[in-house]
Image: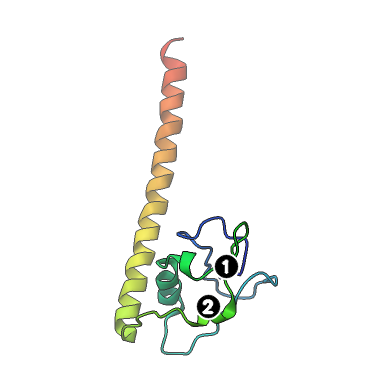
Amino acid sequence: IAEDGANSLTEYPIYFVKGQIWVNNHAHVLKINKDVSPLFLALALKQINYSKYTVGSSRNKLNLKDLENIAIFIPDNNEQQRIGQFYSNYLNYLRINKKRIQYMKQFKQFLLQNMFI
């Protein structure tokens, strides 16, 4: 979770990553217990409007104390898994359709370029 420098408080920079990464000192790294799905937690944190939790006027800063005071409802593990799977399927659907749209735009451009030769 970004500590400072977020461009948007309604779409706050939160990343869910697997494996080794390098994180600079402008981020909060969360360690969660085994009862919480990391994907579910990332999704839940993305739904929060951070304007009431940050300080500063030009570069909003999310202090650790304020981050720790954010309350999130955590359902049972099965529900977390179902929500995470639904979201993953949805993202996959979007990815596939973005590729299709990109292909159709390229095909349209090809047709327009070759129709009036």
- How many discs mark residues in the rendered view? 2
Of the two numbered discs 1 and 2 on the same chain, state the one appearing first in sequence: 1
| Residue 93: % across, % down | 35, 55
Q: Are marks 1 and 2 in contact (CB under 8 Å)?
A: yes
- Left/right placement of residue 45 relative to residue 73 reads right
- Left/right placement of residue 7 relative to residue 98 reads right
Color theme of the render? rainbow
User: Where is mark 2, residue-wise?
Assistant: 66
Which image quarter: residue 64?
Answer: bottom right
Q: Mark 1, residues whose alpha carbon is within 10 Å: few (<14), some, or many (≥20)?
A: some
Which image quarter: residue 111?
Answer: top left
Residue 10 against residue 117 in the figure, above or below = below
Q: Secondary structure at mark 1?
A: loop
Residue 55: mark in rendering: 1
**What residue appears at the point 58 percent right and 68 percent down from the top-left corner?**
2
Give the residue type that dot 2 points to.
Asp
**What residue appears at the point 39 percent right and 79 percent down from the top-left corner?**
72
Give the residue type that dot 1 points to.
Val
Residue 45: mark in rendering: none
| Residue 16: % across, % down | 51, 70
Q: Please name whichever residue, 70 or 43, is drawn nearer the observer in this view of the structure.
A: 70
Residue 12 against residue 84 in the figure, above or below = above
| Residue 86: % across, % down | 32, 67
**What residue appears at the point 48 percent right and 64 percent down from the top-left corner?**
51
Q: Secondary structure at mark 2?
A: helix
